[in-house]
Each structure stands twice: as structure tokens, then as C-alpha cells.
Image (cartoon, rainbow, N blue to C red):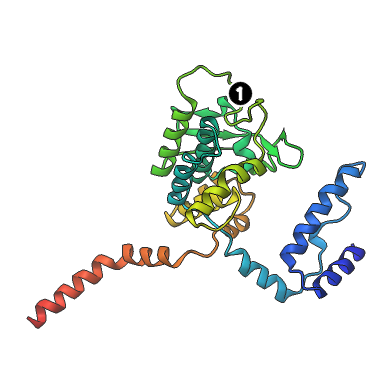
């Protein structure tokens, strides 16, 4: 680990940010783990010697991570349905793939590993018990115990996402073990293809910031949190292993949403008070 930290400080003196350095190290971990006997990386990111001032700055920057709202997700899906570069099948798949995580909070790997028998349309629920490893493109067990869960789609957005999913699946009797979203050869979708062919062109057309699939998950977490969902229920729905992890998803709430919240909470009271004042003057 000492050698890794020495390498880090050389990169820092050349102006590389901690975020860039950590991304480089993650890539190195993946490459080196492929050549190790136990398939584990030879070093851990937990042992990085990061100054407290830099840690604070990283936390501040992480709060500004891109988050797509339910409205954003539907706008993105609408643009995808009109992309000339995609055939009708891809348009339908990608549009549904962008709306579903915004309504359920599913991780990208969990979304791409969904099978037909994981969907209970009548109960309005989706079971998550597998995940696609985007490094090897294989379907594996979920990342931790908390990720094994049943997501209930009970709010208006969730019910709309379920309606879209029902429409996507159609009336045909599908093999229960079939992947809900798959490539032309029946294998799991690759996130890089989904981003390059569908999401990023749609974001560019809408003038939205470039981001990955995780932005839909963040947006779902924010919507549930602002709706006042019980923290324990929220944590279970998201599949987080701790309240600390859930807190990281809150991020910085946009000012327009802050103003809207004040308007909802006190807007009517302000109007009433103003009317009373006008009547008193009259």
C-alpha cells in the first residue's frame, strides 16, 4: 500500500484530482484482480492517505452528482423513442430501461438481470436477486444481503413505471427465465452500449448533463425521501446496507425543489395573511 500512496502523491503534484486518481485505481484493481490467484485486487482503496481537507472537498463534490427526476426520465424516454439511430426494438427497450429505475431505484446491474418471473404485475412488485457484472458481463448474485429485496411500486410514479413495463412485456406468454431486457442474441445488455446508443444522445438533445444509469437511481431515492418515506423503508427499497449509504444519495437538492417545498408548506398561509392585511387596510 505504501507504493500505491507514493504513486498517488506523484499524480497529485501533477494536478490530478482525487476523483480521477480513484477512478484510475479502480481500473487498476480490476485489471490486477484478473491476474491474481484469488481474483482479488492486491490493494484496497480504504488505505489511501487522503488529507481531511481533500476528503471534505470530495464529499462536497459528491453532493453535486447528477440526479435525474421522474420528469427527466420520461423526457429522456420520449427522445429515445424518436432517435433515428435506433430500430424500433431498441427504442422500446431503452425507453423502458430509463423509466423503470426512476420508478424503482434499481441498480443498473439489477435492472439488466431482471427475469420475467421477477415481475409480479398483479402485486405491483419486482424481486431483485441477481445482478449483471459490467466487467465480465455475467449474471451473478447481488452485491450484498440488503440488495436481495422486493421493491414495491405503490406510489404514482411506481405504478406508472409498472404500467409501462406491462405494455413492454405485452400479452405473449414468455419463458419465466427469460431476461426482461436483453441484446439481440439474448444476453444481458451492456451498460456502455446503452449509454452510447441511447442515453447520451438523448441527454445531448435535451441539454441535460452527461451521466450514467446511476443518475436515475439517485433521482428515485431523492423523490422517496422528499415524499417523507420512512427511512427504514427507504433503505430497504433502495437495497442499501446502511443508513450512511442512503444519506450519500440525498445529494444537493436543486433550489427550484427547495422553493417548491416552501411553497407547498407555507404558500397558502402566506396568501391568507396577505389577504387579511389588505382587508384591514381597506
Measuring 56% from the left and 58% from the top, which residue is drawn there? 66
Q: Which residue is outermost to the top?
A: 173
Q: Is residue 213 above or below residue 13?
A: above
Q: Which residue is outermost to the bottom?
A: 281
Q: In the rendered image, which residue does mark 1 sit on? A: 178
Front residue of this view, candidates 34 and 49 = 34
Residue 132 shown left or right of residue 115 in the figure: right
Quarter of the image containing the C terminus?
bottom left
**Residue 76 picture location, percent across and down:** 48, 47
Residue 54 shown left or right of residue 77 in the figure: right
Residue 25 shown left or right of residue 78 in the figure: right
Residue 148 in view here: no
Measuring 67% from the left and 25% from the top, which residue is drawn there? 185
**Residue 261 picture location, percent across and down:** 37, 63
Measuring 62% from the left and 64% from the top, which residue is drawn there? 62
Q: Residues within 10 Å of mark 1 (few under 14, many from 20)?
A: some
**Residue 123 picture location, percent across and down:** 45, 30
Residue 14 in view here: yes
**Residue 57 picture location, percent across and down:** 66, 72
Quarter of the image containing the N terminus?
bottom right
Residue 222 shown left or right of residue 196 in the figure: left
Amino acid at each position: 500500500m505504501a507504493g500505491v500512496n507514493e504513486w498517488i502523491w506523484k499524480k497529485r503534484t501533477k494536478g490530478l484530482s482525487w476523483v480521477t486518481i480513484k477512478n484510475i485505481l479502480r481500473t487498476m484493481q480490476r485489471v490486477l484482480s484478473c491476474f491474481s490467484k484469488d481474483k482479488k485486487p492486491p490493494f484496497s482503496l480504504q488505505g489511501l492517505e487522503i488529507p481531511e481537507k481533500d476528503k471534505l472537498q470530495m464529499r462536497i463534490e459528491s453532493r453535486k452528482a447528477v440526479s435525474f427526476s421522474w420528469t427527466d426520465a420520461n423526457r429522456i424516454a420520449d427522445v429515445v423513442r424518436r432517435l433515428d439511430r435506433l430500430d424500433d426494438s431498441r427504442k422500446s427497450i431503452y425507453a423502458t430501461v430509463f423509466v423503470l429505475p426512476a420508478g424503482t431505484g434499481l441498480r443498473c446491474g439489477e435492472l439488466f438481470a431482471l427475469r420475467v418471473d421477477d415481475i409480479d404485475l398483479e402485486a405491483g412488485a419486482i424481486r431483485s436477486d441477481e445482478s449483471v457484472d459490467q466487467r465480465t458481463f455475467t449474471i451473478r448474485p447481488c452485491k450484498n444481503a440488503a440488495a436481495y429485496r422486493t421493491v414495491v411500486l405503490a406510489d404514482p410514479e411506481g405504478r406508472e413505471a409498472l404500467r409501462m413495463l406491462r405494455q413492454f412485456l405485452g400479452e405473449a406468454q414468455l419463458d419465466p427465465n427469460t431476461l426482461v431486457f436483453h441484446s439481440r442474441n439474448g444476453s444481458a445488455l451492456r451498460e456502455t452500449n446503452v449509454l452510447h446508443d441511447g442515453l447520451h444522445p438523448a441527454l445531448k438533445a435535451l441539454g441535460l448533463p452527461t451521466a450514467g444509469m446511476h443518475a436515475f437511481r439517485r433521482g428515485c431515492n431523492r423523490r422517496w425521501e422528499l415524499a417523507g418515506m420512512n427511512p427504514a423503508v427507504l433503505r430497504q427499497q433502495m437495497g442499501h446496507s446502511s443508513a450512511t449509504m442512503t444519506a450519500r444519495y440525498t445529494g444537493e437538492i436543486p433550489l427550484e425543489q427547495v422553493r417548491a417545498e416552501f411553497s407547498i408548506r407555507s404558500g397558502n398561509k402566506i396568501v391568507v395573511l396577505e389577504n387579511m392585511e389588505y382587508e384591514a387596510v381597506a
